[in-house]
Image (cartoon, rainbow, N blue to C red):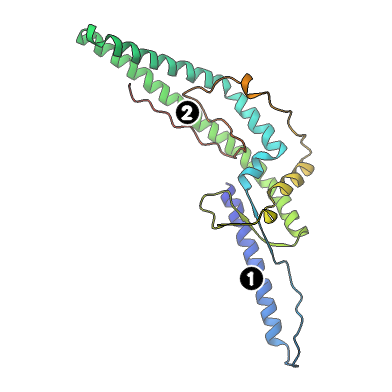
Amino acid sequence: MTRKIVSALSVAALLSAGAVAQTAAAATNAAPSTGTTNSVIAGPNKVAIINIQAAIANTNEGQRDLDALQKKFEPKQIELKSLSDEVDNLKKQLQAQTEKLNEEERNRRVQAIETKQKTLQRDLEDAQNDYQTQSNEIAQRIGGKLMQSLDAYAKQNGYAVVIDISSQQSPVLWAAQSVDITKPVIDAYNVVSGVAAPAARPAASSAPAAPSATVPRRTTPPVSAPKPAATSTTPK
């Protein structure tokens, strides 16, 4: 989503900058030669960068909605953690007792483990897909409104091009901190949205331990679409 938003912005900005350059060139060619340099009215010529993914998730609205989404999935995290622990315990028991079991009992236990493991994997994938879908919906909703704040800020400050650096495929190799407008665009959006800053989060020590099989947790700085954590279900 964010790539689509910024691609549209970048293309529009580049076309705008190109139109300004063509207009200036046409004016220069059309003007009669007088032996003096003709002045041309210049348009916006500044370039800026922005991390759209971070901007969306760090707005007050983004923090509020992504935190609420994380809380919504906490019961599922606990459920998946419990099932994952059960599978791990069954594997350990089988490994410890395998020499004492006859073939029939060993096969029965292996089949039971595989069944629970498949259930765990299916439930985990369903939870991750559901989380991804809902986080994308949040990003789409906020991103569409954020573009309005970005458009207004860029015009007010004379920027001709704004480039997104969210993706690892960004063509920007280096940029001065002074041209990064992520924070001021976030601030501008917070004013327009009217959403208050979220309350301070509790200390990390009071938070529950992260389960081994879980839906994604939002990181800091957050992103618009958290990636699911890799989970191995290969029998031990």
| Residue at mark 2 to residue at mark 1: CA–CA distance | 47 Å
Relative horizontal placement of residue 132, taking residue 69 as reference (left or right): left
Foreground tag (2 vs 1) = 1
Q: Amino acid at mark 1?
A: Gly
Residue furthest toward the bottom?
Answer: 34
Quarter of the picture containing the C terminus is: top left
Task: Report which quarter residue 26 is drawn in.
Answer: bottom right
Residue furthest toward the left?
Answer: 103
Task: Report which quarter residue 20 is drawn in.
Answer: bottom right
Count neighbours of disc 1 (C-alpha within 10 A) and say few if under 14, some if 14 to 19, many if 20 or more: few
Q: How many marks?
A: 2
Which residue is painted at 59% across and 52% down in the image? Answer: 165
Q: Amino acid at mark 2?
A: Asp
Q: Secondary structure at mark 1?
A: helix
Task: Report which quarter residue 121 is drawn in.
Answer: top left
Which residue is painted at 77% across and 75% down in the image? Answer: 41
Percent position (x, y) of residue 145? 70, 46
Q: Is residue 101 visible?
A: no
Sequence-first tag of 2 and 1 = 1
Residue marked by disc 1: 18
Task: Give residue 131's mark.
Answer: none
Percent position (x, y) of residue 115? 35, 18
Q: Is residue 182 visible?
A: yes
Percent position (x, y) of residue 119? 40, 21
Task: Give residue 126's mark.
Answer: 2
Q: Secondary structure at mark 2?
A: helix
Q: Nearer the viewer, residue 236 or 225?
A: 236
Residue 142 in the image: above or below residue 161: above
Residue 88 in the image: above or below residue 46: above
Residue 221 in the image: above or below residue 11: above
Relative horizontal placement of residue 200, taking residue 163 as reference (left or right): right
